[in-house]
Image: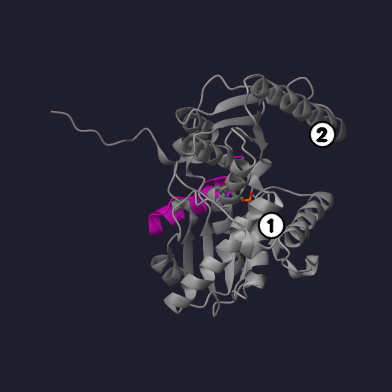
Amino acid sequence: MKLENMEKITTGFYNTPIHKLENLSKKYGINIYIKRDDLTGYATGGNKLRKLDYLLKDALDKECTVLLTYGGQQTNHGRLTAAVAARFGLKCGIIMDGPAPKKASGNLILDKMMGADLFFMDDTSFKDEKPDVKADKYKQLVDKTTAEVVKMYEDQGEKVYMIPIGGSSPLGAAGYVMAAKEIKDQLEEMKVKIDYVFTGFGSVGTYGGLYLGAKYFNAGFEPIGISISHKNEEELQEKINYIQETSDYLELGIDVSRDDLWIEEGYVGISYNIPDPVTRKYMYMMAREEAIILDACYTGKVFRGMIEMIQEGKISKDKNVMLLHTGGIPGIFSDSHSQAMQEELWGEDQKEFKL
Ligand SMILES: *Cc1c(COP(=O)(O)O)cnc(C)c1O
C-alpha cells in the first residue's frame, strides 16, 4: 500500500497550531516552539485521533460496527477511540488492565460519558508472580478476555474491528507520517526552521511515524523520542522492528537503523504513569510560564527531557526546538495524579473571607 494512495477519514481538527513559547524561550535562551496536538478537538483532544483517521477508514471499509481496543485504565487512546465511535455511529469496547476500580476518575468518566463499554482484566491472582510467569498469565488473560468480548459482540450481531494498544499498527502510524508533512508545510509558511521535535516514545506510532515522515518528506527536522516507561533491550528492539514494518507496509523505502534513531531513556521518572515529583515540577513550570497544561504520564516527561537536554548541553542553544503536545490532559484528574497535586498545591491555608 503506497502512502500517497491511502484514504483516511478526518476525525480531528487539523492543522493543529504551531506557536512559539516566548517566556520559556527567554528563560532558557533558545527558541522553543510547540505543536498543539492537544487541540485535535474532540473529547479533550490528543495524538490518537491522527492514527484513528486511518483505522476508522479501514474499519468502515470492512463494514465493522464495533471498535475494540486495549489500554491501561487511563488510556487516552481508549478515550479517543470512544470519541470516534460515538461520532461515526459505532460501538466502542475498551479492554483494560487491572480489576474494575470502585470509583471512576479522569479518562474513565469521559469513556462512560461517550457510551463506551469497558471490560476489566482482574490480574490479582497472579500479580505477585515472577516476571516471566506473570507475563505468560497476563497474555492468557488478554486472549481469554478478547475471545469472550468478541463473542459477546458477535452474539449481538456486531462485527468487531480490533485496534492494538495505542492505535500503533503500521496503518495507524500513517497518521504521524502525514503529520510530519503537515509540520513541514506549516514551518515553511511560518519561515521557521526547527531542528528537533520532541515527542513521547510509548507504543511508538507517534515517534515512528514522525521519524519516517520526516525522512520521507525531507521535512528538515529530527524527532527525539523521550521514553515514558523503562524498556529492556528486547522491548526496545520490538519497537524498532515496528518502525521498520511501518516503513515496509507504507512502501516508504526507508531502512530503519537503530543508530539513526534518537531515543532518550533518562527522563522516565519513577515508572509508567506513576506520579513523579520531578515530572510535576516541569508541568507546573509550563503552566506558570505559558498557561499550557501538560499531563503527568507523557507530555510532562517529554518537556522535562527537552529542558534537561538543553541544560546538559545535549542540545545546543543555536538550535530551534519544538515540543509535540500529544494531549492526555484528563489523566491529571485521575485519582493518583490529582492526589499528588493536591498535596503539593493545596495546603490548609486557603484565604477565606466572611462577613
Ligand atoms: C499515547 C500517548 C503518547 C505516546 O504516543 P505513542 O504513539 O503511543 O508512542 C504520548 N502522549 C499522550 C498524551 C498519549 O496519550
* Left or right side of 208 for 125: right
Gap in Å between the C-alphas at discs 1 and 2? 25 Å
The residue that label 1 is drawn on is 266
- Residue 167 appears left or right of 247: left
Task: Name the residue that disc number 2 marks.
Answer: 135
Q: Is residue 286 visible?
A: yes
Q: Amino acid at mark 1?
A: Gly
Residue 91 locus on image (x, y percent): 55, 30
Query: Which residues fall within the magenta stretch?
Result: 274-298
- Percent across and percent down for residue 353 are 19, 33
Query: Do callouts 1 and 2 mark residues in contact (Cβ within 8 Å)?
Result: no
Return the disc, 1 or 2, that comes first in the chain's sequence: 2
Question: Looking at the image, is 231 positioned above or below residue 323?
Answer: above
User: Which element is circle 1 on?
Assistant: loop
At label 2, counting other C-alpha atoms closer than 10 Å, the crowd grade (few under 14, some 14-19, many 20 or more) is some
- Name the spot of residue 273 as percent of width and height, x first: 61, 41
Q: The N terminus lies in which quarter of the figure?
A: bottom right
Tally of marks: 2
Q: Residue at x 73, y 62 (%)?
A: 247
- Camera-side residue: 185 or 303? 185
* Residue 292 covered by magenta stretch: yes
View extreme (left): residue: 355
Q: Nearer the viewer, residue 140 or 283?
A: 140
Q: Which mark is residue 74?
A: none
Identify the element where label 2 is drawn: helix
Coloration of the structure image: one colour
Residue visible at 43% across and 75% down? 190
Does residue 224 lie above or below 116 as drawn? below
Give the answer, above or below, for where 257 lies relative to 133: below
Q: Amino acid at mark 2?
A: Ala
Q: Quadrant of the C terminus?
A: top left
